[in-house]
Amino acid sequence: MTPAETLGHLSELLDREHEKPVNNKYHAARDFMAKLLKLPSSRIYFTYISKAANFSVRAVQSDAAVQASVVVALIKLRGKDEDAATHRAARKLALRTGKTLLLLQRASPDSLQWNIMGGYFMSADLRSKGTVDNLVNNFGPIPFEPINVSTDEAVSGVLDFFDRVGLSGAGVGVALSQRQDISSIVQFAAASSAAGLSAAESAVIAQRRTLISELKRMIADPATTETDLHRKIRGNYWIFGGRYTGVARGSIVPMDRYDIPLFCADGSLHIIELKGSYIPDLVERHRQHLIPGEEVHKATMQAANYIRQLDEGGAALETLYRNSGLNYDLRRGRATVIIGNQDFVDIPEDPVRQVGAVTRSMIDQTIRTYDSLINRIDVLTWADLLDSAERSLRFESEISTDYASTGGEPGSSTGDHSGEEPDNDQNPTLFD
């Protein structure tokens, strides 16, 4: 279509009673515009502006408005003075929200044809610039005004916008977490300074500490199920350590479905098998000693069968996945079973056998002994897993604080001996 035909078709889709409170009256126009701009429909928002004072309300009054990056404002035909006020309000809104605005207005009070009044976009936003280019390609020359702002003005505008729509810090975090480019955003912001990097790391550490605290409360509750724990831990695979590079999707071996299949840097598979925390019979007495309970044996054998299946069919499966562009090493994989909480074990003294009550240390020794005799499978309690993760965060926090205070790399020295060789018993790449 020519630019005139495109605008004419859009005008036909806008032939509605604009002041009537109907939620879906602009859906057809929205979908048409989304197709032109090659954007999801949720990123386009149409609204009718009867007077300039309504601009700041209409463009942020709903979830759909807040989520949109492009606002098409249908301006009621009133007069030159009112049009000038509308432009001022539109520019202010673009500055405050960072949205790209396109202003349309009827050719005359009785006309069904809409004409383009102009638009506003943030010049520093490459995505907005791309949207504007697409609009010009489809509708012809448009009097867009690029808005140039300093970093301080941009930050102030964003904070003001958050305040006006009632977004808390937690709400902003949730919104950012849903973006596919969140890692790039964080890396760009954090890399601007050592202090920024330290602040970003501290924020992540604080968030992870909160998760660990919540998980500790959950594993202390007998009513918490395996499903509850699995749901809570989903996506937070850092809790198992830093040697993993990804998580497999779906089932790898037909008829076997793992709780959390993680891949290491070398492509090998490490299966995480999650069980519940409320296992009173985590260990039990057998003659004069303690042995792991039945639930531990079952979980361990479940993991062992997974590994056996991978060993037997690994070569064929590797070829299958390699043809799909995935380089997996499915043979000689490993597994970790997370099960139980020592606090739920209550085994009193036994006068007949002349043995005392079972302590936390005795439980740990029993599991450690059992673990040492099993090849390629680790057994760990939820309490031990969370304690280990918490210690790791404490270490990361110390490193981050050291980095911020020295302004150099973590572990670096700013003293007079910075040029000396490290001691022979130190390994400077140990935590790289």
Image (spheres, grey):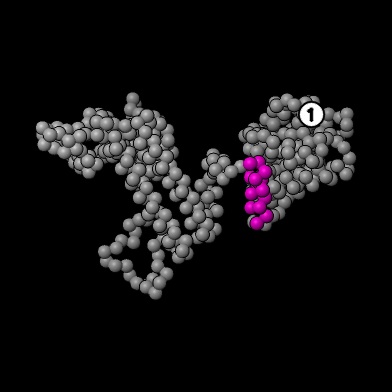
Q: Which residues are magenta?
A: 152-166
Location of residue 215 (image quadrant): top left
Residue at the outermost front position: 351
200 on left or right of 276 = right
Looking at the image, which residue is at 40% across and 43% down? Answer: 212
Residue 428 image position (x, y, % from top left): 34, 61
369 on left or right of 331 = left
92 on left or right of 335 = right
- Work out which quarter of the rendered image holds the N terminus and state it: top right
Residue 299 image position (x, y, % from top left): 27, 31
**Visible residue check, residue 38:** no
- Work out which quarter of the rendered image holds the C terminus and state it: bottom left
| Residue 162 sits inside the magenta stretch | yes
Looking at the image, which residue is at 47% across and 53% down? Answer: 202
122 on left or right of 328 = right
Residue 291 image position (x, y, % from top left): 18, 35
Q: Amino acid at mark 1?
A: Glu
Looking at the image, which residue is at 74% across and 34% down? Answer: 47
SS label for mark 1: loop
| Residue 50 sits inside the magenta stretch | no
Looking at the image, which residue is at 22% across and 31% down? Answer: 293
Observer-nearest residue: 252 or 169? 169
**Visible residue check, residue 23:** yes
Which residue, given by chain and number where applicable, does mark 1 sit on?
A: 19
